[in-house]
Image (cartoon, rainbow, N blue to C red):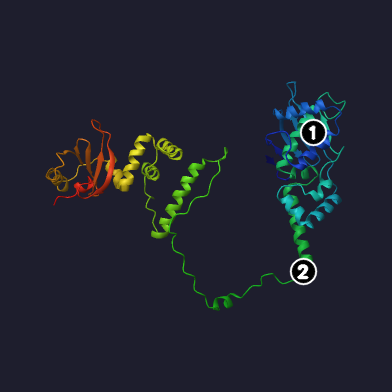
Amino acid sequence: MITSRDDRRRTFDSVPPGTEPTSWWGRAWTAALEELSRDSARLTRGLAYADSGQVDAITVTPGRLVAYVRGSRPRPYRTELALTPFTDEEWRDLLTSLAADPAALAALVEREIPRSLADRILPGPGDLLPRCSCPDVAHPPCKHAAALCYRAARLLDQDPFVLLLLRGRGERELLEELTRRNAALAARERPDSAPDFPGVPARTALARPLTPLPVPPGPPTAPGAPPAYPPDPAGPDPLALDQLATDAAARARTLLGTGEDPYAGLTLWQDAVRLASAHPTAGLTTTARRLYRDLAHATGRTTTDLARAAAAWRQGGPAGLAALDEPWDPPAGPFDRARPALLAAGQGPFRPHRNQLTSATRQLRLGRDGLWYAYESRPSTTDWWPTGTPSPNPLHALGHPDPT
């Protein structure tokens, strides 16, 4: 929409979709023109023209609404609807009525035609005068004027100030005049009354003793449950909203208790693994499968990669994920002492490779945090999955007691 500087010329490059008006004043607008017609077929063709987008930009000025309508010929027709503007006296009466009627004024501000003033503002039978440059002038309105009327009704649905501009006043000047009249009316009604909330001198207010603030409540015992999000084809995924709301509640509770967000520095992959780790039933429920699929797609990984990483996160958090994803070369010491300890406990020989000790279907990985992380695999495969609880003692990580 383009508005000129003087607020009395508006051009609408686009009109809301649809042809049938949705507001009661939009329907009253079309009814005023339809009552002129003696040929319902013309109205039907005009409705089809409007619906197919054959009405170009619409320009509104006081007393006139103009657009070019494309018909069967290559050159579009200049089509207009004329409506007699109000005289200055009629505007004074209307503005006085609006300023004195809070309900009507509130309706207009909310971009609705006040029903109390509908008979004075809306056109009646014979008030709308169609004109068109087409040769079909015997029985107005022609199909081009009907098309313009239907499209203009959709404009009025969204912005009834278009109708008031046709009556002679632009939106800005109209609201400014109503503001002045409303202020003047309020001043006449209460010229010398005291304010509803009398003030207190600042010195007096500061001299009053201050009551101590109540002790702030502690953090909740558990994160609250998120609200239900009904499915909406035009809205976001309700499952994703539920996941985000649940995670936000848990992080907010941690912030209240510690003043820190433990997940603020996570990478995209780490945060995706953290979110997935809260749903160990990845293959059992529709919600978990959908979450795993979306997180894997967002990080460029497979759902298997994500499920394995989530198991590592449940095993040891960020350190557990690092033990899965980041092989490294540990210094001598605990790593070199682990192999003899495992042999002495009858756990069999473990082959060393970087920070890993492997024996058949079992594996231990030394994390950078000094803990041993246990893994298992099916026979004759290298599909290692985290298992058990990490421990500084390799035997404890495997789930065996220390013989000493």
Residue at point 55%, 76% (across, down): 206
Do the residues under discs 1 and 2 have CB atoms within 8 angstroms? Answer: no
Q: Quadrant of residue 147?
A: top right
Give above or below for 245 relative to 144. Answer: below
Q: Earlier in the sequence, mark 1 or mark 2?
A: 1
Residue at point 79%, 39% (across, down): 29
Say few, some or many: other residues with alpha carbon within 10 Å of mark 1 (under 14 / 14 to 19 / 20 or more): many
Q: Quadrant of the N terminus?
A: top right
Of 150 and 203, nearer the camera is 150
- The percent coordinates of residue 267 (x first, y second) are 37, 44
- The percent coordinates of residue 386 (x first, y second) are 28, 41
* Residue 237 shows up from this direction: yes
* Residue corresponding to mark 1: 80
Checking the image for residue 92, the label placed there is none
Query: Dot 1: what SS?
Result: strand
- The percent coordinates of residue 262 (x first, y second) are 37, 52
Of 48 and 404, nearer the camera is 404
Of 355 and 145, nearer the camera is 355
Residue at point 22%, 36% (across, down): 361
Residue sitting at the far top:
73
Give above or below for 179 relative to 314. Answer: below
Give above or below for 147 relative to 373. Answer: above
Distance between the Cα atoms at labels 1 and 2? 49 Å
* Residue corresponding to mark 2: 191
* Residue 177 shows up from this direction: no
Of 195 and 85, nearer the camera is 195
Q: Quadrant of residue 53?
A: top right
The amino acid type of the residue labelled 1 equals Glu
The amino acid type of the residue labelled 2 equals Pro
Residue at point 22%, 38% (across, down): 362
Query: Dot 2: what SS?
Result: loop
